[in-house]
Image (tube, rainbow, N blue to C red):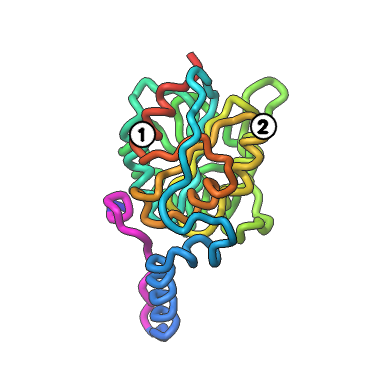
Amino acid sequence: MQALALGAADTLFKPASGDRMGGFGDALVDKLGRLADPTLSRGGAPSAGTRSTGAPPMRPVVVGEEYDVVAIGASTGGIHALSQLLRAIPPEFRLPILVTQHLPVSFMPYFAAQLAVIAGRPCDVAADHTRLRPGRIVVAPGDAHMRCVALPEGGAAIRLSSEPSGSGCMPSVDPMFASLAAVFGPRMLAIVLSGMGRDGADGAGYVHRAGGCVVVQDQASSVVWGMPGAVADTGCAHAILPPAAIGRLAAARQRP
């Protein structure tokens, strides 16, 4: 976890004693190939009209909007970016922060502990019925999607689900974004950081249509501009920024 927070791109479990090395070698070569090949990191070859180099022009973020919740999706290279983002958020920031990061389930307690230290605020691995509370971070477990539902008495809570997602990821950013958009509408900020593939692009569409704000990490600072680039290609991103700037933007837009 410390290596990932410092900038390591990805992880790979070493083989157990007695395991064949062939599978490990294949997995290692696949990960290196995806990191080196931008068309693979985006989930396929660029379609007609897709920008192959550089970032799409940034759409201006409307000044004065306020949010009640922040949701962050990330994968390969995302832990380092998330660390930079959280360090830019001051201690007085009170909005709940939800994080879906592609990691094996065994990593999640250590991931939550690492984020708590970096952010200077409590961080929990989500459980069913966990309530969203001010000043706290909740991370998706490695074996379930994190969804949000409105509570009859007010507020919101998390429901975990394990059905297959369109992106094929577990956990997936898409159901988190889509469910939060249904509950919070224009009062949410969705952030997509470095990662392979296009998880989060469909969910960002729900946020955009609900009137929420979508911000993605810029290509220059991303280890892999797959997930943020996929959102940018849909036209849903209101801004494309480096992680620390995203943190400052989030801090400036919380509801008083």
Assess disc 2: are there few (<14), some (14-19) or many (≥20) residues with their C-alpha within 10 Å of its C-alpha: some
Please say whether residue 213 is visible from this viewpoint: yes
Tell me which numbered mark, 2 or 1, is placed earlier along the sequence: 2
Residue found 72% across the figure and 24% down from its top: 152
User: Which secondary structure is most common in the magenta stretch?
Assistant: loop
| Position of residue 245 measured from the top left corner of the image (x, y, whole percent) | 36, 34
Q: Which residue is mark 2?
A: 210
Outermost residue, front side: 49
Q: Which residue is mark 1?
A: 245
Q: CA distance from mark 2 to mark 1?
A: 24 Å
Which element type, helix, strand or loop, lies under badge 1? helix
**Amino acid type, label 1:** Ala
Q: Looking at the image, which is closer to me, 131 or 74?
A: 74
Which element type, helix, strand or loop, lies under badge 2? loop
**Amino acid type, label 2:** Ala
Give yes or no for residue 170 being in the magenta stretch.
no
Magenta-colored span: 3-17
